[in-house]
Amino acid sequence: MRDTLPAHFTDEARFFRSPVLPDTELLSARFFRHSFAPHWHEGYVIAVITAGAEGYRYRGARHVAEPWTLACINPDEIHTGERAAEEGWAYRVFYPPAELLQGLARQLFSDLGSGLPRLPHEVIRDSALAGSLARAHMALEAGHDLLEAQTAVLNAFSTLLARHADLPQRGAAPACGHAESRVEAMRQRLAADIGEQLSLDELGKSVGLSAFHAARLFTRETGMPPHAWRNALRVNRSLPLLRAGVSVAEAAQACGFADQSHYTRHFRRVFGVAPGRWRA
């Protein structure tokens, strides 16, 4: 792919919400130039590629999603995103909270455990499902018939879970070794007060490790160093503030960023647009 793109190849992105999915962010976008740095979301990512191709790194492998395939990311898992074709990629994306798919799975299937449904790590090549999800997304965006839109999206999500999800089984306890428990404790410490100034020494001390070993263990297990993981958390936690009408500067301060430009830079890495544009 050429490094220099024609001037008319400009990125376009529109975030919106629907009253039938009040806690779900929705994105319709075409990206040529933007690439997503490693980041994560607290909920799921369900992306329908409609044109071009998206490349992304997820769980140690690089994937390429072509038109009418799905790129899905599970909650709290680190991933990237960039164009894998000269013409970039276009997609429609759902960002449903973890509780939505978990609750839907419980309604659909009996004898489920307490964990979350896990969507495949690989690209899902199911053109019929991709079409159903895209039509539901467009219906939510149009907003002409909310009953029809809600029916379409719930049917599509149900099909995704039934065909492709790894569902939690009752009685199956997740294995959690000493390293994993230490990393989880560090996550909790980082999330306890996102505006707090916290040193690696303090973070390591909270789990009985030196600063060096704490940083190395956290990075090895999560794929991101502690400061990068925390900045992604801060971006995720800023969304309710922006929805509530808080200014970008106030959201930056409330979530512990040094200044508005620092916040904006990290926000763009996660969502591809500036926070003011996302809110609008």
Image (cartoon, helix red, strand yellow):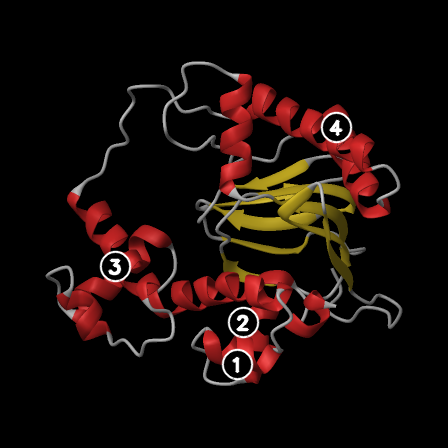
Where disc 2 sits, the SS reads helix
Relative to residue 231, is residue 82 depicted above or below? above
Crowding near pointer 3: few (<14 within 10 Å), some, many (20+)? Answer: many
Q: Is residue 131 above or below residue 227?
A: above
* Callout 3 amino acid: Met
CA separation in Å, label 1 and label 4: 40 Å
Question: Which numbered mark, 1 or 4, is in the foreground of this view?
Answer: 4
Question: Where does residue 125 sit, x and y in percent of width and height?
Answer: 67, 29
Label 3 SS: helix
Find out whether the residues at labels 1 and 4 contact each other: C-beta distance under 8 Å.
no
- The residue type indicated by label 2 comes to His
Task: Tell me, yes or no, whether the two marked residues, 1 and 2, touch with CB atoms within 8 Å.
Answer: yes
Identify the disc placed on residue 216: none
Q: Residue 247, percent across and down?
A: 62, 78
Q: Residue at x 28, y 31 (%)?
A: 174
How far, Cα to Cα, is label 3 from label 2? 21 Å
The answer to whether marks 2 and 4 mark residues whose Cβ atoms lie closer than 8 Å is: no
Residue 223 in the image: above or below residue 275: above
Name the amino acid type tagged 1.
His
Whole-angstrom CA distance, mark 1 to mark 3, is: 23 Å
Circle 4 crowding by C-alpha within 10 Å: few under 14, some 14–19, many from 20: few
The answer to the question of whether label 1 and label 3 lie on touching residues, with beta carbons closer than 8 A, is no
| Mark 4, residue position | 151
**Label 3 belongs to which residue?**
186
Q: Is residue 11 left or right of residue 22?
A: right
- Which callout, 3 or 4, points at the residue further toward the start of the chain? 4
Q: Which residue is mark 2?
A: 266
Residue under label 1, please give it: 262
**Label whose residue precedes the other's in the sequence (3 or 2):** 3
At horizontal 49% and vertical 23% (from top left) the residue drawn is: 106
Element marked by disc 4 = helix
